[in-house]
Image (cartoon, rainbow, N blue to C red):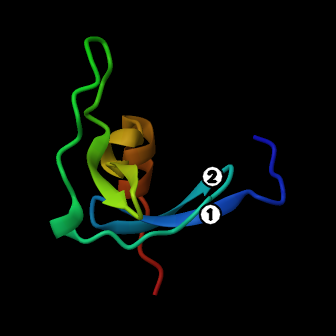
Amino acid sequence: MDHTIETCIIVVEVRNKLTGVIVDTVSEVLDVSSEGLEPAPHLGEGINTEIFLGMAKIKNKVKILLDIDKVLGTKEINMIEGLTSVS
């Protein structure tokens, strides 16, 4: 993976553990309340929407939120679960 000036580490909670995930870029950070979250739409046959946590309308734009537990693969989740907490 090539790192650029826009490469970031975002902190996410995976199965009750905080961990960092390296991403190519972050365009914005939003605070979305559970009241503003709607179910993910059905996008047609053959499109897996299980990774979508839901969607929210913010400033007249629709944002799709991802379920990080479903985005990460089993290998990554097992690795995170095997980490010990640092105090």
Q: Are marks 2 and 1 in contact (CB under 8 Å)?
A: yes
Percent coordinates x, y for residue 86 in the rendering: 47, 80
**What residue does disc 1 label?**
9
* Foreground of the two, 84 or 64: 64
Q: Callout 1 environment at 10 Å: few (<14), some (14 to 19), or many (20+)?
A: few
Q: In the image, what residue type sits under mark 2? A: Val
Q: Residue at x 35, y 67 (%)?
A: 17
Residue shown at the point (32%, 69%) measured from the top left: 32
The answer to which of marks 2 and 1 sits earlier in the sequence is: 1
Q: Is residue 20 above or below residue 54?
A: below
How far apart are the two marked residues, 2 and 1, measured between alpha carbons? Answer: 6 Å
Q: Nearer the viewer, residue 58 or 79?
A: 58
In the picture of the structure, the residue carrying the numbered disc 2 is 23
In the image, farthest residue toward the bottom: 87
SS class, disc 1: strand
CA neighbours of label 2 inside 10 A, class few (<14), some (14 to 19), many (20+): few
Residue at x 30%, y 56% (from the top left corner): 56
Label 2, secondary structure: give it.
strand
Residue 1 x/y as whole percent: 75, 40
Residue type (three-letter) at the residue carrying disc 1: Ile
